[in-house]
Image: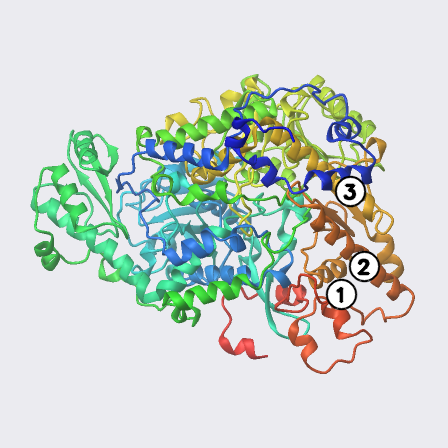
Amino acid sequence: MDRIPLAALEHGTPFADRHIGPRPAELAAILAAIGVGSLDELARHAVPESIREGELTLDLPAPATEAGALAELRELAGRNRVLTQMIGLGYYGTLTPPVIRRNVLESPAWYTAYTPYQPEISQGRLEALINFQTMVADLAGLPTANASMLDESTAAAEAMTLVRRAGRSKSARFVVDADTFPQTIAVIETRAEPLGIEVVVADLADGLPEGDFFGVLLSYPGASGAVRDHEALIADAVARGAKVAVTADLLALTLLRPPGEIGADVVVGTTQRFGVPMGFGGPHAGYMAVSKGLERQLPGRLVGVSTDADGALAYRLALQTREQHIRREKATSNICTAQVLLAVVASMYAVYHGPEGLRAIATRAHRMAAVLAAGLRAGGVDVAHGAFFDTVLARVPGKAADVVAAARELGVNLRLADADHVGVAADETTTREHLRAVWQAFGVTGDVDALDADTADAIPAALVRTSDYLTHPVFATHHSETALLRYLRTLSDKDVALDRSMIPLGSCTMKLNATAEMEPITWPAFADLHPFAPAEDAAGILRIVADLEAWLAELTGYDAVSLQPNAGSQGEFAGLLAIRAYHRSQGHGERDVCLIPSSAHGTNAASAVMAGMRVAVVKCDDSGNIDLAHLRATVEEHRADLAAIMITYPSTHGVYEDTVREVCGLVHDAGGQVYVDGANLNALIGLARYGKFGSDVSHLNLHKTFCIPHGGGGPGVGPIGVRSHLAPFLPNHPLQPLAGPATGVGPISAAPWGSASILPISWAYVRMMGADGLRRATLTAVASANYVARRLDEHFPVLYTGAGGFVAHECILDLRGITKVTGVTVDDVAKRLADYGLHAPTMSFPVAGTLMVEPTESEDLAELDRFCAAMIAIKGEIDRVAAGDWPAADNPLANAPHTAASIAGKWDHPYTREEAVYPAGITAAKVWPPVRRIDGAKGDRNLVCSCPPLDAYSG
């Protein structure tokens, strides 16, 4: 036996060997099944020579061990300086209950789940989201809320476009309260300009401005902390034909009269202070609630109540016909997901504390602010506003910078509002000692307890909330840790996440989210940073940002990267804005046509419209590739006004198209730019780079290729990479000059670096994999997809393949012929897979009547074979239906999934109970769906999007 070098022994098992599922013997079997002798041979056969970089040497650091990477991250965390954060502006200290942190935020049962497209095996997180929607709707005083938004600022921008769609006004003007968070105003302006909306920022203290406008955005409380009575303003806006949106502090609404009670049409904000750490800006769950009649205009996800086949109450995603894959350029928004994991945290924070607990937390923050203000006044400092919730604006002419500097010396960050004003925000973590430190920074002293006894609240009597909220029993039941622990376990047991099964969703890349990658995100040195604190406080996280930007640029062949976009959809928007700005800088503002293949994800078209572009669809040929003849004709038709083409590579059909260089060349020759959607980058790392084969810009999905977990439907990170000529047009931020170029397009997310606190996940993945590990992961993913395609093709034809019969990292199984002959649908197969203990692939995208399978590199051969065996067995069941052994309306597929309750009573089906629930044998891994097949249409006809009353469960 050869002696292993001491250096290798010291390094231990490489992380890549932990991340990649198939062992060497298993990989050899996979390769043999697809007819190649090695991963390198697979690369030569599958990836077109025209883009493949044969001897690609990536400039990445050598792979670190898990222990080594974590040690480096601890050192980087130590470079951050975490002060007491009293800056405010939408980000506040909060105490995440340990039972929620450990059992939601740090639990793979929650963070490895996907968007609940299979609701029968997603009832746990759907219930948590119903709780979230109920919480938001109750506090906002409106009937319907969605299942979260990306952040407060993008929620406000979405509110602007919603009221424009829903209203009757023909005006292009949108009025924004000047006392709105500056980042929110900036995001709104970025979103408005391409749409031709004129944003009027106005001081509304003396009423609305003259002239017409389609909508108004009010802030409650304002950025200055002021709490104002908006009832008359709202009435005036409505009388003038406008709709009204309000940004509101959700915690404040436990004490303040809710906007919905005085006529607001839309209420938006963030749930960050409901137990979600600041995390240097995110991720956090934004929210949106709407008045009656606006439900179908809501962007993002909406969970609704329906019933299953037995009439039992069940949850599912409602009104999905609003979404991009159906409506494309006519969709309500380009947002196709949101912040589910953080919404679950926020909802459980409300469940744990209940209405009385939330009111107590809000009262604490308010009383701290009231006593703080009293002490300042007693010391001769002018306080700008008499009515406020948690934020005090102090007037110190010419001395604001000195006060802020003095506070930093005492360990407290305050807000430098301008040269004459300092903002101080209290929160759940504020203590009396913090008040003394702030007073000292202002040069005053005070007796906290004496002032507390003598100081009245600072909320006017007319604005005190009198209505009830969170009256559903779920908010009164789980207040002990034992009760909440068991509730969380009960919910997670209803779901299938990666901790129970492979999730072979095509176009989703459900790979391993390694524990070592996840561990740092809850470290206080990352979690407790305020996004608007001085940059010197964040030296460690900014080093992670710089490393990740450089590594992503190297991996993709681009020259610059922005990490600000906090979702793939926002990356698309940012990339298209960069293209638009570039054309304008060249004097070609007339270039506004975006070509999009018919196979593209619907967010592409929706994003193009948001960026002020017109969409022209390019056909695909019979092989699923871009129809070059149609592309040439379309390019020629739009030669004078062509802005860009958006393509996905490998294609959404799961194929490496060998004409991609030609496609790029045709568009460039006509003066357009090339946008390559990075959704399928997991099939390219280490083999080819977008920026080297003709692309100008891409968004990348860190929640796919780079291991940030999907969280049940968010968070995500969608950074963009660009060639050098587009770099001046990357996003920037008004509150942090380091976050982007001065010539940038403006912010597209609330925080300067988006969802910064989860960037250590992707940093750790690249740092531990190294260049060779990343390339091996890519080729293993491609090998696994081809293995599945070869094993299943005779049972379910593979719809598209590339040269030599190979697919990329995913394959499309065509069930349309089967459905035509037998009546068995993709829905039947998907639901039946749950009886086999497996999550279904992607249904009917990008082709109706098909299943798209993406196994990823993380699944070992046993799991791949388990999936293939289940699919082959299901084909056998379909054959029995076709042969007449089972009626078309009464068979294991039509009745799937089967619950434990469904086999406990009378059984009058033509198949056995064992065939129903143990189709893979009684020793196989078993998932018990909590409900039978859900009636989606019924739920859409009778839309209910909040917690149903208890008697609804007894039907």
Residue 335 located left or right of residue 672: left
Q: Report x, y in % for residue 19.
A: 59, 40
- Which corner quadrant holds the N terminus? top right
Q: Amino acid at mark 3?
A: Tyr
Q: Amino acid at mark 2?
A: Ala
Which quadrant holds residue 610?
Answer: top right
In the rendered view, tell whether residue 83 sits above or below residue 98: above
Determine the secondary structure under disc 1: loop
Numbered label attached to residue 884: none
Circles 2 and 1: CB atoms closer than 8 Å: yes
Residue that badge 2 annotates: 873
In the rendered view, tell whether residue 74 sits above or below residue 369: above
* Between 679 and 617, the one nearer to me in the picture: 679
Q: Amino acid at mark 1?
A: Pro
* Between 452 and 578, the one nearer to me in the picture: 452
Tell me the distance, in whole angstroms, between the alpha carbons under discs 3 and 2. 17 Å
Q: Report x, y in % for residue 918.
A: 73, 67
Tell me the distance, in whole angstroms, between the alpha carbons under discs 3 and 1. 23 Å
Q: Residues within 10 Å of mark 1 (few under 14, many from 20)?
A: many
Determine the secondary structure under disc 2: helix
* Between 85 and 81, the one nearer to me in the picture: 81
Given the current orientation, which residue lies at the most extreme front position? 1
Numbered label attached to residue 787: 3
Determine the secondary structure under disc 3: helix
Q: Residues within 10 Å of mark 2 (few under 14, many from 20)?
A: some
Residue that badge 1 annotates: 919
Tell me the distance, in whole angstroms, between the alpha carbons under discs 2 and 1. 8 Å
Given the current orientation, which residue lies at the most extreme right position? 883
Name the colouring of the figure.
rainbow
Circles 3 and 2: CB atoms closer than 8 Å: no
